[in-house]
Image (tube, helix red, strand yellow):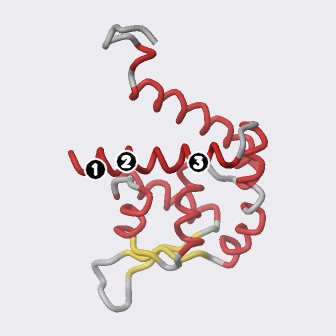
């Protein structure tokens, strides 16, 4: 690394942006047979953790604005993985529920993390350490926002 504070290789934002694009690119061919994009995969992960969820809860869980999330949910619904319907207890709340097909997809998706680890070729311990560091960066950025 150079002493130049504005050198591209010294920028945390540059490293994060390139790493994110590169890793997400590894997911594309793995997710394609499941008819999922990476953002849709994140939605499915959140729903496999807890189902149903309101659009607001999903938005908070995956850190996407509801306006960005809405088209993803429409496509997931068209694929047959989720259903969207108004809450029976509060009609202002739109709930997202997995369909039987969406629930069944989880067994296929369980293979994805191992495939990504294999493609990266890094030790799991190193990836876990990196994940912890990224969570620290996210928390720090949210505190200052």
Q: Is residue 61 left or right of residue 39?
A: left
Q: Residues within 10 Å of mark 3 (few under 14, many from 20)?
A: some
* Residue to which mark 2 is pinned: 138
Residue 37 visible in the shown view: yes
Tag shown at residue 142: 1
* Residue to which mark 3 is pinned: 38
Q: Residue 25's x, y, as percent?
A: 64, 35
Residue at 37 percent of width and 90 percent of height = 88
Q: Residues within 10 Å of mark 1 (few under 14, many from 20)?
A: few
Q: Is residue 59 above or below residue 128?
A: below
Q: Residue 136's x, y, as percent?
A: 39, 48
Q: Residue 45's x, y, as percent?
A: 58, 63
Residue at 53 percent of width and 48 percent of height = 131
Question: Which secondary structure, mark 2?
Answer: helix
Q: Is residue 25 above or below residue 75?
A: above
First in residue order: circle 2 vs circle 3: 3
Q: CA distance from mark 1 to mark 2?
A: 6 Å
Residue at 67 percent of width and 74 percent of height = 103
Residue at 63 percent of width and 76 percent of height = 99
């Amino acid at each position: 690394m150079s002493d130049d504070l504005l050198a591209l290789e010294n920028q945390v934002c540059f490293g994060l942006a390139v790493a994110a694009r590169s890793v997400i690119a590894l997911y594309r061919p793995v997710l394609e047979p499941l008819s999922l994009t990476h953002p849709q995969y994140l939605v499915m992960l959140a729903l496999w953790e807890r189902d149903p969820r309101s659009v607001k809860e999903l938005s908070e869980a995956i850190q996407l604005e509801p306006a960005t999330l809405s088209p993803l949910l429409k496509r997931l619904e068209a694929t047959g993985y989720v259903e969207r319907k108004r809450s029976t207890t509060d009609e202002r709340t739109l709930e997202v529920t997995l369909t039987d097909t969406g629930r069944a997809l989880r067994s296929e998706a369980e293979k994805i993390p191992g495939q990504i680890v294999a493609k990266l070729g890094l030790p799991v311990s190193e990836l876990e350490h990196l994940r912890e560091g990224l969570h620290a960066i996210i928390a720090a950025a949210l505190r200052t926002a």
